[in-house]
Amino acid sequence: MSMIRSPRKWAGGMLCLALLLGTAPGASAQRAPISFDDYHGYTGTVEYLQAVNRAYPNITELLEIGESTMGRTIYVLVISNMRTGTTIDRHIELRNPRRENVQNVTPMKSYHGKPGQWIDGGTHGNEYTGTEVCLYIIDKLVSGYSSDDGLKTLIDDCVFYVCPIVNPDGVYNSVEGGNSQRQNSMNNDDDNDGRINEDGPDDLNGDGHITSFRYRDPEGGYVVDDVDPRVMVRLARGAETDKERWSVIREDRDNDGDGRRGEDSERGIDVNRNYPEGWYGDDNEKAGSGYYAASAPESRAILEFFTNNTNILLVQSFHTSGGFTYRPFARWPDSRIDAKDLAIFDKVMGKKYCELLGADYPAEWDVEPAPQAAAGQGMRMRPSGAPQGGTPQQMVRVQRQAPGGQQTTRAGGGGGGARGYDLPREWTHPYNDNADRPYGYGIFIDWAYAQFGSYSMTTELWNRSRDFPGMPEFEGDDVQAQQERWLVNYQEENNGGRFFVPWQSYRHPDLGQGEIGGWIAQYNSRNNAFPGDALRHVCDIHWQFELFKANLLPRVVVTDATAEVLYETNSATEASVTYQGDTATINRGRRTGAVKVVLVTATIENTGQLATQVARGARLAGNRNDAVWLVGDRDRITFLQGTAHQSIGVLEGVMPIPGIQSSAPAAGGRGQQQMMMQMPAGIPPEMMQQFMSRMGGAQPEVQAGNTREVKWLIMIEGNSPLKVIVTSQRGGTHVKEITLR
Amino acid sequence: MKMRMNWKSVPVLILAALVMAAWSNPASAQDKEPANPGGYHGELDFTISWKRYYSYEEWTKIMHDLQTKYSSLADIESIGKSRMGRDQFLLTITAKETGAHGTKTAMWMDGAVHGNEVNGVMCCLYTAWYLLTRYDYDPYVHEMLNTTTFYILPGLNVDANDSYVMWPNTENDPREPYRPEDNDGDGLYDEDQNEDVDGDGELSSMYIEDPTGNLKLSDDGRRFIPVASEFEDVMRFRSLGREGYDNDGDGRINEDDIGGPDPNRNYPYGWNLGAGWPYPMSENETRNAWEFQRTHENIFAAFHYHNTGRLIMTSVPWEVEGAAPAAGRGGGGGPYGQGRGFQAMTPEQRLAQMQEENQYAQFFDRNVAPAYRHDLAVQQQIATMGARIMKNYRPTQAGPPGSGQAQSNSYMSAGQYAYLIELWGTHMDGDQNGDGRVDQEERMLWLDIELTGEGWVVPHRFDHPDLGPIWIGGTMKKHIGRTPPARYIESEAFRNMQFVLYCASQFPKAEVEEIKVTPSTGDLLWVDVTVKNDRTYPTISDRDLEREWVDQDRLSFSSSSSITRVEIPEGSTIIDPNDRRTQGNVVGTEDPEFRLNGQSSRTFRYLVKMSGNNGWVEFTINSFHGGTATKRLNIRSGD
């Protein structure tokens, strides 16, 4: 088995963390202090975001992008130097507007002219570890700005959009209320009794926490642990036992007397099944959640925000739990992903993620840019029908020589076989390769990749067995019980016993005598990182992952721009032509004085790692190619060749993509694609140029890669300032002024 | 599952009594003249000109004034705000004293999802006005408002609707809601819109004199037409496109006009990114409308107005591969089936035969899943009547529901029978030689005759600040090609209103037709009850039925204490093998649940035991859209 073995596990990770902290001791100015010894919930998060915004007004902006059903605001913290960057609308003078003068276009913010990275948490209310990771990342970014040159460059040149809580009602109910709520809230009559949200969970004993109620029940699925009677041990389904059986339920009663408990809470829909990509099933009927895709206020707020911030290229959504990351798709097989994007996802981002976790990844991911370099190396494929995954800790992998020993990186049909490698447990995709079946419908990252055009991924944070510093690696068939005992003691020693309530006798109004106690729901650590060291550990690994990705963002700049005067006269006049028979007569008109004919040449370069769009990004509705403007005094400039703005396709990044040939011209966006399609087959490149110029494209030649050279021939009456502006939707906007030579 | 508010609390008998009382003695109409088809005068109670288009301010004032005057029939509300902050006002029209709007089966109408298609606003406004002013005079309208609710949203895309009327525009703009969009990929949004350069209030076309051009002025000086040959010695022109400026200095004119996605590709069902960017229901205007439609589950049918081309586009189930072939279907699911010979014909032959009897007959040739055949037949029937009422409107079937259009969405997402009406079409009126289209000459003649010469922007010279001396003109004015000239507003609106009212008149009505008793042995009696729906529409659309969005019709039994129902185990008894009517309809222990098709009846048989000489049985049918009806039969035992 040719697995690449990364430094192992959290112990190594903690070492890295220590080193990282050590590199900038005390230098970071933390003007908005934050602790991870407890969860922030909705209230604490809002307070922190406001505090950060107050403390760092020059590099943050706090936006309200929507409101939940229960009236809670959805916030996005924008992190970018508000004093750097520019946007195209600041440079183009608009004349003679319609008298109607509708004000539907608002001026762009400077950060709209920078490549963007989106980070969110709390889409599922009970997965609030994601919120903490977002806050941790915010802290690292803002407090590191003044001390870390790398961070300063990122925050000057790029923009981070952090939305720690997508689903405020779910997070509020889960953290502040102790009532685990994955869904958003809705004013629905779930049980059809004419009343709305009348039967949710209850703090029966009034101690301010939702814990558990346990009671003796011959049908119960629990027994009291022999070693530590505070711990309840769940029996396997159908297991026999001589011990007394108990049932354990959430602290709850039947509020409306209909014989059911908690059947009409605020719980609404799963927001992460409410996005437009693949919301309908194969039969064209509803398969996602909600009345329709984007029906929920939360998903609509996100969709609307993205629509107005199309500079976002990287999208990270933090969920829990399991300790792995999902890249697209949930709805479709990998055959729907371009080979180039697949390589960026897996061999660039996935490899780094596995390294950060100390996890194994396929040897194929180590291929160097030249695809043949790894030829001859065995390819692992899963025999058809073999189960995916295996045990939670170890992947079942079977080595097999591929036919002909050929290596392929092409995304394949349904299964992972044609992809050329099995995905490791820590970096995978939700789609079920083996059964060729969607994981879900209407999922956020599917939309963000397929319809919006970003590299999107969901991380399922927290794997209790792996991510808890200091927790022994228990063995045996009662690992869960051993962990529980250890955790109850741990919180007693480290958290003053705040997270576990001793069992106390209680008479339940519906179920009779029993006991209330156990984990305070928020802290049971099954679905969320335990506050303190464990949480910090999880946060830090994912901060490093985001930092890695941020450094991949494209950055488009005008590296060079010159103007060469080809011809100059001080006594030009206007002229027109009349024809009479076979004679053309030139009529002189107004004197215009000094006139120059000028050749402007500009070099545009993407200095970032990734291209300015995902493989098919420029062709999606709402997206566009990179464009370059030549702007001067409109009254004095005439374009002889070239137009004021022109498309330059999609600029590749400087990073070679593992296993992928450098881009052919066809890799550009819509414009170039169409030109290519209209071209007869087999036409030599030199002839292609003719077609392109005739079709209005002013590109002097077919250009690819991460640079473009653009030329204009213009006439200037008198003098005019000149500037070349490149405006890339996801690669930023950059200006270079030219002085006439 | 649709739940109608307060349904159970409506005392049905009292409601029926109220209907009778209101109709036989309309208190408010005592001093007026009822029942006079020779001329009702309700319109004099609220005079309004139908010879002009109204701005947003004006049409919403008319709505408010109507509501104030007819407050017992109308409510007004804002269903939300547009992007630019205008309220989308909606009228709810029904006779309030016969029941709240939510308790009645309802019609939805929206006027203009496309900004420039403001004749839909006028159709909606006209329908509201017609219903309100005639309630006290016209028995047809009176009965309709007693039993039916109309939700009327004259302007849907209100920002653009208002702009179209108020500002110089081409007949095609502005069409979309005002979401900024970068049409030309230059990084700027809506930065190069069209402009009325010469300030004459019309948005026409620009031409420039050019010896190499291929256009010349027509002899009458009204149009720019191609030169006859390259040797023709005339002043030549070149087209510069629509009137406007190069606002952003990129050398192009009007290349990034206001507005974003097509709002009629923005609805959820069948939405796709390419047509409906950026996401389903992204626009406030469409979302507010659909949220109202979706949450008012008493809405049974929906009209969506567009232009142009005089089409009645009916929502019908989409084509299903492998469904029954064309010749073997069409009448299968409903009351409209024809004989066996008919089944063997080609669709063309069938239509020809049908049109021998009724020149307006329609035949929808589409393979649909078996569960949707009744709706296909129903819509065919409705479309036939639509063609009859609206004469030169052509019925069509809405295409496959694959692009987020309102009419498909109303049906597929909520089970509402839906109609997209393409209003108006000058090409039909102008066709002289009967070739089905209107060429330039015919169009000019039409303008001269029908509009007595109005409606044309005559080419004239103008000094364009950027382009120098040019010519502007040679096009029709705004309200001609797509929105009818003012003089035709009312005639178009009137016929369309009639069709809407016809459809509302065919909303299902569940009735207990008759109860019959047949003595069995001893003191046992067979009771046969027949329930029916005489209307064209079924009580539940095929879509609602298949998705189980509506409770089925339920027949319930009650009786005097002397009569008890004998509960027959399901399927245990064959009553009369020769009576096909009752086969399979013997009621066992459960109240029967079913759907009453359009123009259909069903008979159910009960076995009862009678003690003593007197008693009664009573049957109530309760239908979500078909209403509630009860009938009682007294039974007396002779000697």
Image (tube, grey):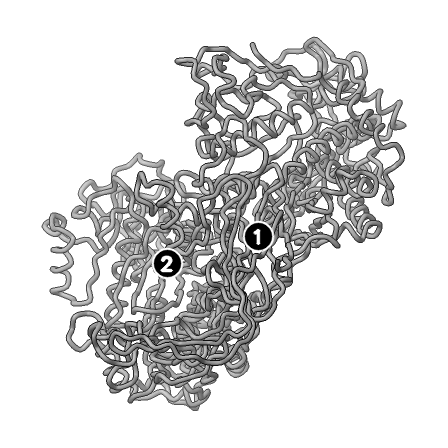
Q: Residue at x 41, y 71 (%)?
A: B117
Left or right? Give the position of B218 relative to B417. left
**Image height check: is B557 above or below A313?**
below
Mark 1 residue type: Thr
**Displayed quadrant of residue B215:** bottom left
Between marks 1 and 2 in the image, the one whose residue lies nearer the viewer: 1
- Residue A243's x, y, as percent? 72, 12
Secondary structure under badge 1? helix
- On the same chain, marks 1 and 2? The answer is no
Q: Residue at x 16, y 66 (%)?
A: B358
Judged from this view, the residue extending furthest toward the left is: B341
Mark 2 residue type: Tyr
Q: Residue at x 33, y 79 (%)?
A: B474
Secondary structure under badge 2? strand
Residue A343 visible in the picture? yes
- Residue B385's x, y, as percent? 25, 67
- Residue A561's x, y, as percent? 60, 52
**Displayed quadrant of residue B31:** bottom left
Question: Where is mark 1, residue-wise?
Answer: A307
Q: Nearer the viewer, residue A307 or A93?
A: A93
Query: Are the residues tagged 1 and 2 within 8 Å (C-beta)?
Result: no
Residue B288 visible in the picture? no
Left or right? Give the position of A349 relative to B12. right
**Image height check: is A481 above or below B87?**
above
The chain ID associated with circle 2 is: B
Within-10-Å neighbours for mark 2: few <14, some 14–19, many 20+: many
Question: Where is mark 2, residue-wise?
Answer: B417
